[in-house]
Amino acid sequence: MNYHRKANLTLTAVFLFFLGSALLEHFNPVNFGIRLMVFVSEAALVGGIADWFAVTAIFKKPLGWGYHTALIPRNRDKVIEAVASIVQTELLNMNLIRKKIERIPFIEGLLLSVEKAGGSIYLTGLILTYLQRYAEKQDPVQLAEKLAAVIRSTAQTWNLAPKVQDLSEWALKQGYIDLGLDRLAEGLWDKAADGETRQSILRYLEEIKEEKVSNGGSIFRTLMGFVEMSDGLNLDEAADALQVELLLTLRKFRDPLDPMRSSLKDILLNRVEDLESDTQFSAQIEQWKEDVLSDVLLNRFLETVLGESLRVALAPSTPTDPNALYRAIHPIVEKYWVSVQHNSELKEKINSFLVDTFCQVIQNEHDLIGGMVRETLATYTEQDLNQFIEEKAGNDLQWIRINGSMIGGVVGLVLFLCLDFVYDPYILPTLMNILTHISH
């Protein structure tokens, strides 16, 4: 039911009750019950009219009375500012917003959403897409120039000699020196076993023979001729024998216990230990660094590396045929994805970070709340603003009118009983006696 109508009906009923009681009192002025009804109805009518005037004065001028009435239209700007301020600072203040946001398990919802989308595979795809979009916009030449400039500007403070020594010691401890010697022996074996090496040995022997013959006398040359005719000096056989001997030596070198290999390893170990105090080595490393940094080949090298990296990054990738970049980043994403799922402490930190981020964004834009309220209410006319407030608080305001009639009637009843049973029979005679004595 419309409470405005209900309040009007209540006031009308009280008014009619008062008229009926007043009419009955006219014919029966001494009747207790009639006098009681008149007094109570009169008080109820006064209370109802007073509250009707007060409630109506909030929105407009009751009966044309303009003194301190039509409060909302008269103070429209103040009302808008007050409402905006209440909404921004009281109803939606940052402490309340943060408490509400902290109750939301962002990380759980985020993890569930990502898991439904495919988990680490989905995340890898997103990262790959972002990297490819970024790579499409890059020029290897410009990247190489920027990277080279950064390297040249920072490399001046690099002291590479200790790092080279540390790297060498680390390689020795990790067994990479033996692996390197194995690779060296295999490479030398392959090189020594091919035909070009045999031809090189043969040419070297022929050069030695020619040198000896040219430096020897006629008798020596004659003897060499007889030796060659009798096949006593066969350079082809000598080259074959030397190649076989070389291959046998390299085969022994592949054995970790080979004396020559052990000797070479000891030399390397001693050389690494002496690097720290070797000023010539430090100077050579610094000179090498300067040469590399000043050489245009650094830019070309970086351009080649970056170009190849971009080519690999931009290669097509599908779930069934992932490219190299996908295969490189997926294990890392998978590792961290599993870690996040099973690490409650990490999830709590991530959730706190998300809460702090959201709250910081809201705090930075918190004034927008009041601004939106002001902008919205500023479009309301005085009638719209009255209607807006009546829709939100009209029922309670109409109950004030109803309560005014009810409370007025109750107060009237109490006053009537006090006057009839206390004031008239006891208090009034006493006061009259006192005044009589004073006058005499």
Image (spheres, rainbow, N blue to C red):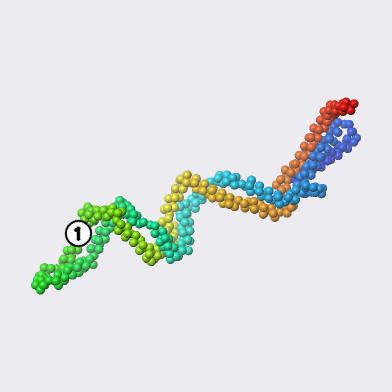
Q: Position of residue 183 (x, y in %)?
A: 28, 58
Q: Relative to 33, is 3 on the left or the right?
A: left
Q: Note whether residue 319 is visible.
A: yes
Q: Which residue is mark 1?
A: 248
Q: Relative to 134, is 171 on the left or the right?
A: left
Q: Relative to 363, is 204 on the left or the right?
A: left
User: In the image, what residue occupies the spot 30% across and 51% down?
Assistant: 173
Q: Position of residue 92 (x, y in %)?
A: 62, 47
User: In the image, what residue occupies the spot 59% across and 47% down?
Assistant: 94
Q: Position of residue 341 (x, y in %)?
A: 46, 47
Q: Relative to 428, is 343 on the left or the right?
A: left
Residue 410: image quadrant is top right
Quadrant where the N terminus sits is: top right
> Which amino acid lies under the numbered mark 1 shown in the image of this protein?
Leu
Residue 295: image quadrant is bottom left
Q: 8 or 131: nearer the eye?
A: 131
- Secondary element at image label 1: helix
Vertical position of residue 216 compared to residue 75: above or below: below
Q: 2 or 351: nearer the eye?
A: 351
Q: Note whether residue 311 is visible.
A: no
Q: Residue furthest bottom?
A: 218
User: In the image, what residue occupies the spot 31% across and 52% down?
Assistant: 169
User: In the image, what residue occupies the spot 41% across and 53% down?
Assistant: 331
